[in-house]
Image (cartoon, rainbow, N blue to C red):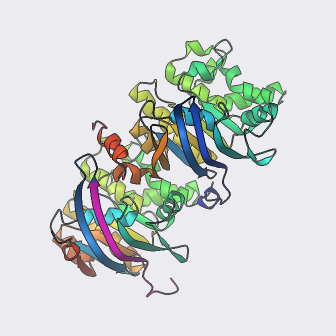
Amino acid sequence: MSAVERLASEPLLRVADLSRWYGSIVGCRDVSFEMHPGEVLGIVGESGSGKTTLLKCLSGHLEPTSGKVEFDTRRHGMSDIYGLSEPDRRRMQREDWGFVHQNPRDGLRMRVSGGANVAEPLMNLGRRHYGEMRSATIAWLERVELDTSRIDDKPRNFSGGMQQRIQVARNLIHGPKLVFMDEPTGGLDVSVQARLLDLMRELVRDLGLAVIIVTHDMAVARLMADRLLVMRRGEVVETGLTDQVLDDPQHAYTQLLVSSVLQI
Amino acid sequence: MSEPSKPLIIVEDLAKTFTLHNAGGTVIPVFEHLFLEASPGECVVLSGDSGVGKSTLMRSLFGNYVPTRGSVRVLHKGAYVDITGASPQVILDIRRRTLGYVSQFLRVIPRIPTLRLVMEPLLENGVSIEEAEARARALLSDLRLPERLWTLPPSTFSGGEQQRVNIARSFIRRYPVLLLDEPTASLDAENRAIVVQLIRDALSEGAAMIGIFHDEDVRDAVATRLFPVLAYKVAA
């Protein structure tokens, strides 16, 4: 994908004045931003800052108290995702999106094989040709650097890093336009983390994917994201180009966050 | 270039002040009212002792630091774009196509082999894999980086080797504007001479450069004029 295509001017996602309250407690408030195809947006902040609430609202899992999330869907064009009917929204989530969870158990079906996990999104989209699905699955297992001879093993027989690779393959095989990632390397050893990050970065670039990645790890943010939203107490306190936010943070909270990172 | 006299980068009334919110709001002014231009074939060398703000200026020009005031306009795809007010998307596009940066340090993704790192700027600009690889190999040979290192990620390389990887990444394609922050700091004399030649070649082909060089020989060999950053220091 060329840089020109990456700069397509029509937004893929438009978030306007999004707030989510839990009773009188704020989850996130007044969040607005746009995303374009091919962009990688990092949402950073410490635990309790509202990252996860925001991600849930964006990904159609939690209806905001107020505000709008609009997405350029394949079937309906630019649509308010909470204005779609439940079946339409679910279909859009299956067709247009992927979601990589921190814990592979939340993103994989542990009782079926790794291969079936990867192939399932294709079946959900109505593909029925067994041979084609199997070859697509094998191609994706290779792409995430998994041993294809283990296609029939259950996820529990894979290591944590390998389970994450299965999850990544499962969330990319159907050609999504936008992938959400919630601390995708959070539970992994550092060495495994670096390999997975590198792999994800390559895939994102090759496929021209748009990604929203939530992380509390500034190194992960620097590696993956083009730009950042910094959250504190439910609000976005700073946004900008990733290296700008990390190297010359303007807000007191971001300065604290960046200066708290241990150097190695 | 159709209009060789047009500056490729124009800095106007630039000021940078750091405010440390977690140190009682300490304010550190660095420079102000700074004006600077570089045209094709020019290599403007920032001069002044360390601490005067040369690196801060370079980072502000690259969009890495956020200036407090002023503009940094770069001739990008035929029009001047102010990098200080541009969206992240536009800044990334300017960096991909127009504005290169050679820092003293190599900051790259772990695990990616050197050859691939050097090919990357070409691949991002739509050059085929075959051509990118051929050009990367040629440049790494010119820079005398031993071939056995090409398939390895540079994290374990010596300072001088890493710096040559860095230089290769910035000279593999012609950036119209190049920012050079001590690109020869950890190189021996022979390698310095090679880099000087690369810089001169790029200048003669119409690149505009702004650089920091502590090595006087290198500075004398490439500078078309000196720019004393101290002159823009905020009066204490």
B169, B76: nearer the viewer: B76
Residue extending farthest to the front is A24
Q: Name the quadrant containing residue A55.
A: top right
Q: Considering only vertical position in the picture, is A114 above or below B111? A: above
Is residue A209 shown above or below A11?
Answer: above
Instruction: Determine the residue positioned at 50% across, 41% down.
Output: A43
- Look at the picture and state if A177 lies above or below B93: above
* Quadrant of residue B190 within the rendered picture: bottom left
In the displayed structure image, the side of residue B124 where residue A98 appears, left or right: right
Quadrant of the image occupied by residue B63: bottom left
Classify the position of the C terminus of chain A by image quarter: top left
Can see residue A245?
yes
- In the image, taking residue A12 as reference, residue A131 lies left or right, namely right
On the rendered image, what quadrant is the N terminus of chain A found in? bottom right
Give the residue drawn at x 26%, y 74%: B45
Q: Is residue B81 left or right of residue B190?
A: right
Of residues B181 and B130, the one nearer the viewer is: B181
Q: Position of residue A160 (x, y in %)?
A: 50, 20
Counting from the top left corner in percent of width and height, residue B40 is at 41, 81
Q: Is residue A49 magenta?
A: no
Answer yes or no: is residue B182 visible.
Answer: no
Q: Foreground residue, A145 or B12?
A: B12
Q: Nearer the viewer, residue A67 or A107?
A: A67
| Coordinates of residue A48 in the picture (x, y in percent) | 45, 30
The location of residue B204, given as percent across then percent down, is 39, 80
Give the magenta-colored segment's residue range. Answer: B1-19
* Image mark count: 0
